[in-house]
Image (cartoon, helix red, strand yellow):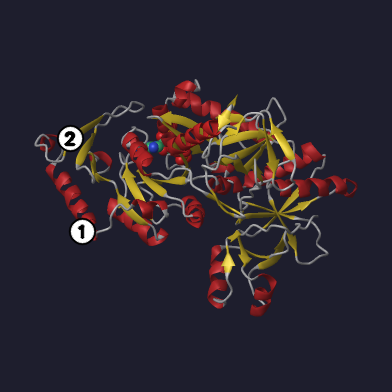
Amino acid sequence: MSTEAGTQDGQELLEAVARRRNFAIISHPDAGKTTLTEKLLLYGGAIQQAGAVKARGEQRKVTSDWMELEKQRGISITSTVLQFDYTGNIINLLDTPGHQDFSEDTYRTLAAADNAVMLEDAAKGLEPQTRKLFEVCRMRQIPIFTFINKMDRPGREPLALLDEIEAELELTPWAVNWPIGSGEQFRGVIDRRTKEVVLFSRAERGKQSEERHLSLNDPELLDLVESDLLEQAIEEMELLDAAGAELDLELVHAGELTPVFFGSAMTNFGVRPFLNAFLEMAQKPVARLGHDGPVDPLNPDFSGFVFKLQANMDPRHRDRVAFVRVCSGRFEKDMTVRHARTGRAIRLSRPQKLFGQDRAVVEDAYPGDVIGLNNPGMFSIGDTLYVGPKVEYEGIPCFSPEIFSWLRNPNPSAFKNFRKGVNELREEGAVQILYDTDESKRDPILAAVGQLQLEVVQHRLENEYGVETRLEPLGYQVARWVNGGWPALEKVGRIFNCKTVRDAWNRPVLLFKNQWNLNQLNEEHPALELSAVAPVVSGVEPISL
Ligand code: G4P
């Protein structure tokens, strides 16, 4: 390549990276993730582009029909990534599967995200699924933007919601806007930076509310908003100002300070200001840690890693898709890349971009984007693909499973296929496999984050490996890895109210019936360090069945 061409490519890459923002929404079911996503896509025009504007009811129906179909086939439906343009920027929304398809993929998606939007229901505050997902964001120190939703309905005190974030997540909240009243008396928000008031007007259900902007000093405001509500909001803002924290972007990018926005996704109130502020403050695709140090997204050589595998997404084709997060360089269709784990060269001839259930072939992609690759069983979670000098990204850790079940094979003559299926599905990352410490109990224990994961494994064993299996649930709900491994465990001697098993790398894992039993162990043996996430093991072959 000539120097001139190289400079031009470098400039193109620089611009592409500067325009990109990627994020995932972390929330508990019902907080309004679907509603917020729809509103965000509307701004980007993505819904029209994909021809998917439907009445909400109809859309729901389509979605649930699809889900039913997929469930019968044991497939998880997820849109995975939605890309849209907004004011000249390209936004990638990585969809975190939730609800009944909550699985380890939900956590893994966060490994591919540069930012997270923490969505709370104003009436509920922090909820369990959000806390768990937050822990994963914390581990990676990704910036968190908080959207407190459903302000049009009676909710908790805004100050109490901020206190909860600070006390429970040890994350400093910084309210970017402040609500005037709430529920029936919700009148709008005041932008703390510009002192501009955005008034809320209640629209009929299903219609968009209007946003009217006024200065806080505008005398007309008192004709439009009850003075007591306005005074209360101003007093509360003064309290926040007196508390002193500043909106420090460095702290935001370090995942220590969260900008907070109040709004109502359903009525589309506060969504656009949120999106604008997010674009201004969010982290652009940043350097990723590889085995030999950080890899700059502006490095001209393409590299990326697999963060999710999905089997049989398209009911018409029995295909498998590997989702790759682009980390550096420009990806081009038909590119030949190297697969770091096996050293093999692979030509990527049919890369795809996905929009819900629609797909399009991608011509190119840049850091922060996600591409879908056909996966004829070659890719595993965490695999790196690269061009040029070798790059290998740190893999994706194992996340604490919550559902455990013996996997029985009632037919001894099918053992060979059973073994092959279990080993391959584990390798692919479809499920974690644990083993009893008593070697006479040879059946594997499936360990998953969501029930659907187990159903998918059973379904795939039957369809792809021809073995019918039986699940026998174990009554445990919490798993913890032991830091320091077997020697650390031996030091504390006999422990009660938990079961010790081994993972595929022969590391001890403790299973507890409930959180209470775990807390009890922590109290009895404070020196025993336990972890909800297990680091990636490299260079060691896992135990096969
Ligand atoms: P999820 O994906 O996080 O599970 O939540 P989803 O968007 O499906 O929203 C859950 C429910 O909360 C929906 O009501 C939705 O309309 C409602 N909702 C979302 N945002 C707001 C908001 O800002 N204000 C109010 N008042 N409600 C909101 P639903 O009754 O389950 O469905 P639908 O009949 O409205 O479609």
Q: Which amino acid, by three-letter code, is at mark 2?
A: Leu
Q: How far across and down, in percent of the image, does residue 510 sit?
A: 65, 66
Q: Residue at x 53, y 39 (%)?
A: 367
> The residue under label 1 is which amino acid type?
Ala
Question: Where residue 221 sits in the image (x, y, percent)?
Answer: 13, 36
Figure quarter occupied by ligand 1: top left
Residue for point 60% across, 32% down: 1
Reading the chain from its start, which is encountered first: label 1 or label 2? 2
Whole-percent x, y for residue 399 in the image:
60, 55
The answer to which quarter of the image holds residue 254 is bottom left
Question: Does the image show residue 57?
Answer: yes
Q: Along the line of sight, which residue is nearer the eye, 355 or 104?
A: 355
Left or right, 262 with respect to 446, comes to left
Front residue of 456 and 114: 114
The one of 271 and 401 positioned closer to us in this rendering: 271
Above or below, comparing residue 293 to residue 198 in the picture:
below
The label on residue 242 is 1
State the SS at label 1: helix
| Crowd band around label 1 with a 10 angstrom C-alpha radius: few (<14), some (14–19), many (20+) | few
Residue 48 vs 169, above or below: the answer is above
Q: Secondary structure at mark 2?
A: strand
**Pointer 2 residue:** 214
Marks 1 and 2, how far apart at CA: 24 Å
Q: Residue furthest left?
A: 219
